Amino acid sequence: MQTFQNALRKKTKARRGATMIDVIAGSMIMSALLIPSAHLINESRSNTHRLNVRQSLLDDAEQVIEATKIGLSEPIAFSKAYSGGIDTVNKHTTAYGPFSVARTRVTPDKSILPAELVTIVVDVWHDDDSDGRLDTGEASATLRTQFAAP
């Protein structure tokens, strides 16, 4: 009876460490889990870059609007914009592309009289093909505001 118990103890003795098959199986499971997560990491980087570009465009548009407001704060410039409107296109370099293009349109808003208002619309985009026009696929942002006579 004692030999049977000794034989049973030898068979049920816990092994210490992993065999080569355990290591291979574990590494296969880990690689199966990590390959999709690498794709998700790359997708996250792409989304972050796109958001940074969008934020850069919005910052550029805000700067153009503020510069336009400063220009319109002189009575002569405002009356010229109120009587005929302004349409300009400017190029400048940015951190997220070769350059961005800002189109500024200032149009009179005569819906509320006697107040003299102009509407300022700024379209900013990364002009990848350098043609000065907004094409499909180019990142863009548009801001709109109104400005009263000084």
Image (cartoon, rainbow, N blue to C red):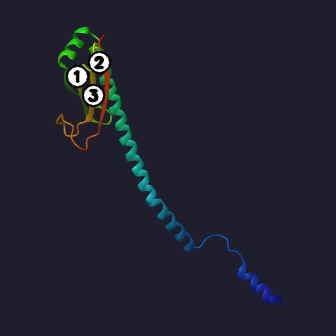
Give how far across and how far down residue 22 sits, in percent: 57, 72
- Give percent across and percent down for residue 58: 34, 31
Q: Nearer the viewer, residue 42 or 140?
A: 140
Earlier-in-chain disc, 1 versus 3: 1
Question: Which residue is label 3 attached to?
Answer: 122
Residue behind mark 1: 107
Three-letter amino acid code of the residue under disc 2: Ile
Q: Residue at x 37, y 47 (%)?
A: 46
**How much space separates mark 2 and mark 1, taking CA atoms?**
14 Å
Front residue of this view, candidates 55 and 10? 55
**For the residue labelled by badge 3, is the local secondary structure a helix, a strand or a loop?**
strand
- Give coordinates of residue 123: x percent, y percent: 26, 31
Which residue is depicted at the point 24% across and 13% down? Answer: 78
Q: Residue at x 29, y 39 (%)?
A: 139
Which residue extends farthest top?
A: 75
Earlier in the chain: of badge 2 and badge 1, it is 1
- C-alpha span from label 2 to label 3: 22 Å
Q: Amino acid at mark 1?
A: Thr
First in sequence: mark 2 or mark 3? 2
**If the image is split into quadrants, where does the N terminus sit?**
bottom right
Front position among marks 1 and 3: 1
